[in-house]
Amino acid sequence: MVTVNHDYLDLQGSYLFSTIAKKVAAYQTEHPEAKIIRMGIGDVTQPLVPAVIEALHKAVDEQSSMETFHGYAPDLGYTFLREKIVAHDYEARGAHVELDEVFISDGAKGDVANIQEIFGRDNKVAVGDPVYPVYVDSNVMSGRTGTYNAETETWSDLTYLSATSENDFIPSLPTTHVDLIYLCYPNNPTGTTLTKEALQEWVDYANKEDAVIIYDSAYEAFITEEEIPHSIYEIEGARTCAIEVRSFSKTAGFTGLRLGYMVVPKELVREGVALRDLWARRHGTKFNGAPYIVSRAGEAVYSEEGKKQVKEQIAYYLRNAKTIREYLTEAGYEVFGGVNAPYVWAKTPKGMTSWAFFDFLLEEKNIVVTPGSGFGPSGEGYVRFSAFGNYESVQEAMQRITK
Ligand code: PLP
């Protein structure tokens, strides 16, 4: 008899965004006249920039001729793209990353979910709280999280690194040993960041404890404040304890194209094994490469024109974030994030849970946000506003809230 993977059966409920979608659909059916403004899901809305479109067209044409056709990509991804990544994302910021430490992928979601495969099942896992739900769910699927407590909405074998307004969104170091630490900065959902000094503490901790940090910086392009690190490799000692995951999704609107990368430094060795080699083996076995066309589009993001255009697009979303921050503050809400990230994290009115405030905003203001509790127990009492909409809708939504 075929058995199923019982670890999958431990997964909790339906995915946050499908629950939201169901609630919104039910409300819209009951109130067909309602003009709902969606500030929930973190997908981009602006079209791809001209430099990317041009590169796509050119690459498509190349595929039509025998001389310039490309089939399977090289194992680690195309060198032309990896060279740009090393030069622009790392060398330009004084961080050391080598060409054969960069693995091109089809996006950060797969990378952050799959990386746990190269680690033993008995590793103790710590996750930021609140945080992007994929880190937890991918570890549930691989049997590392223990049992679920529905009351506290926590897993027995996970360590939660709580980040709330009480600790200025800077989680404390774990009090008991952990092996794998998932950090996400700029953070989804809170939109907050860590300073170099705060991140240094984590790197020092990981090196001391022989732990590994999985650093998700999918929102790096939104950093505006000078002193905030863009990469964990800007921190001394990170090459012996950290893996970094990046994405073109939010940087350049590639959510539909699909492109990302992961850096695994050669000095990162555990049990005498170079994790870079282990990941190379996994990558070569289970992934057949990001498409040539999309890789050329990614390369265009680093051209002079591409950089300028992408920067303008990010400025557009950041203007939305600023608008959200200002209106909500004026309306008396306590807000965080939105300066170095496309998310604004707002405290719910006193005594209201995240879902109660979600319902209130949907029913009374016809605005969809994301309930903070969906990102972890410390997200309770907050909601996330996404700045990825168009400016006019953001303004209208904010006017409805302040009215
Ligand atoms: N990491 C974080 C923190 C995210 O918020 C997201 C998407 O929302 C991803 C990764 C996924 O990125 P990608 O589109 O590259 O799979």
Image (spheres, rainbow, N blue to C red):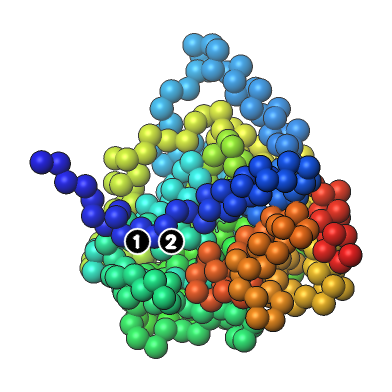
Residue 161 visible? The answer is: yes
Image position, residue 48 (x, y; %):
71, 36
Q: Is residue 164 above or below residue 130?
A: below
The residue carrying mark 2 is 135
Pointer 1: what residue? 139
Identify which residue is drawn at 62% across, 34% down: 297
Which corner quadrant holds the N terminus? top left
In the rendered image, is residue 232 in sight? no
Spatial distance from mark 2 to mark 1, Cα to Cα? 6 Å
Q: Is residue 84 above or below residue 215?
A: above
Would residue 327 appear left or right of 363 to someone viewing this image? Answer: right
Label 2 crowd (10 A; few <14 / some 14-19 / many >=20):
many
Q: Is residue 268 left or right of residue 37?
A: left
Is 346 situated above or below 15?
below
Horizontal and vertical percent position of residue 293: 56, 28
Q: Residue at x 29, y 55 (%)?
A: 9
Task: Name the amino acid type tagged 2.
Answer: Tyr
Residue drawn 53% across the image and 64% down it: 374
- 390 on left or right of 288: right
Residue type of the residue flagged with mark 1: Asn
Q: Are marks 2 and 1 in contact (CB under 8 Å)?
A: yes
SS of the residue under disc 2: helix
